[in-house]
Amino acid sequence: MSFSFFKPSRPKTPQDVAKAIKDSLVALDTKTVVEVKALEKALEEVEKNFATMRCMISGDGEVEPNAEQVLQLAEEICKEDVISLLIHKLSILGWEARKVLVHCWAILLKQKVGSTYCCVQYIEEHFELLDFLVVCYDNKEIALNCGNMLRECIKFPTLAKYILESASFELFYKFVELPNFDVASDAFSTFKDLLTKHVNLVSEFLTARYDEFFDSYEKLLTSPNYVTRRQSLKLLSEFLLEPPNSHIMKRYIVEVRYLKIMMTLLKDSSKNIQLSAFHIFKVFVANPNKPREIKVILAKNHEKLLQLLENLSAGKGAEDEQFEEEKELIMKEIERVACSSILE
């Protein structure tokens, strides 16, 4: 049940609704909104039109939405450049209007004409709108709304690809560590979606920007913030272990700098971080083609590593049995590497 102050009126046509929304958003630009009362009235008009849009898109609780009308509305919103206005006016809108917009956004993006998602196509022709939404994480008033809208966009490969390859992507390394916990967590959710929703796309991205990406990602793994370390470590294991990224994994596990990071995380005060680090560390050790530099590091630190692993446990249950078996194999391999080093 909607508790909006405005009761949606039965719309005449999708064209009428799109035009009404556009006109009310454009009115927010007029000089009259300098006056408080005029601005309040203009915002009320926007909220009323958004309520009408929601009624057309989702129904009113009694009447189901008409699929043809919903599609026509999406087409009109693109035709009238309303999508651009919706994004650029987000910071001016009230809480209720933003809430309704986020609800409608997800539905509008899914509207398809033939083989084309019309709203997605519009954004493809105006990619700067995605940059704008990313930058909005810096505005805590609308950050969560923008995050929801971004994650809906990321469901579409072309939009996810643009963000990954844009300069805006680098901003996530800052946003995931913002002091506001809710905003930082939301930013990390979007960051995670970018790196996990489309595995083949991500594989291409990591292949093309390997050094640049992992240089930045290292800062997350070594962050003084516990939540950042834990989330980024877990995410790393998720996308590295995806089959399309096997060549990335092979490259990652022959680099001494990354082995040292995992060894440091094995000593973390958090058991959860220790366990997550182990699942990546074990791949370095189990690699049958370990380069000499990796073997030297393992041999030189084998006593400390064996002690750390000896004290590491997964807990109780079936998972613990598997963990103990893996741990035993890794400890034996470390001992073997150490013995081979001595013989050399």
Image: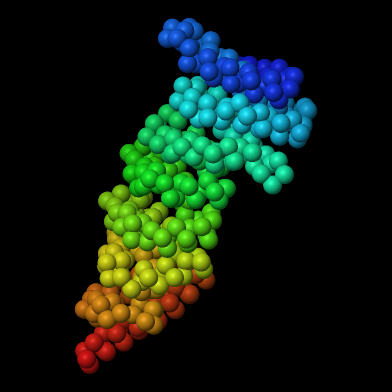
Q: Position of residue 267 (x, y in %)?
A: 28, 64
Taking depth in this image into account, of 236 and 46 the one nearest to the observer is 46
Relative horizontal placement of residue 302, taking residue 115 as reference (left or right): left
Which residue appears at 51% of the width and 68% of the height? 243
Q: Residue at x 58, y 14 (%)?
A: 45
Query: Picture coordinates of residue 271 (x, y %)?
Result: 36, 61
- The one nearer the camera, 91 or 338, is 91
Q: Position of residue 143 (x, y in %)?
A: 44, 34
**Image x and y of residue 41, in percent:** 53, 10
Give the vertical position of 75 relative to 164 (above or below): above
Relative vertical location of residue 16 with respect to residue 254 in this rendering, above or below: above
Q: Residue at x 44, y 7 (%)?
A: 35
Residue 254 against residue 58 in the figure, above or below: below
Asked where in the image residue 175 lies, by quadrant, the reply is top left
230 displayed left or right of 95: left
> Does the image show residue 57?
no
Position of the C terminus, as image quadrant, is bottom left
Q: How is the image coloured?
A: rainbow
Q: Name the foreground residue: 103 vs 201.
A: 201
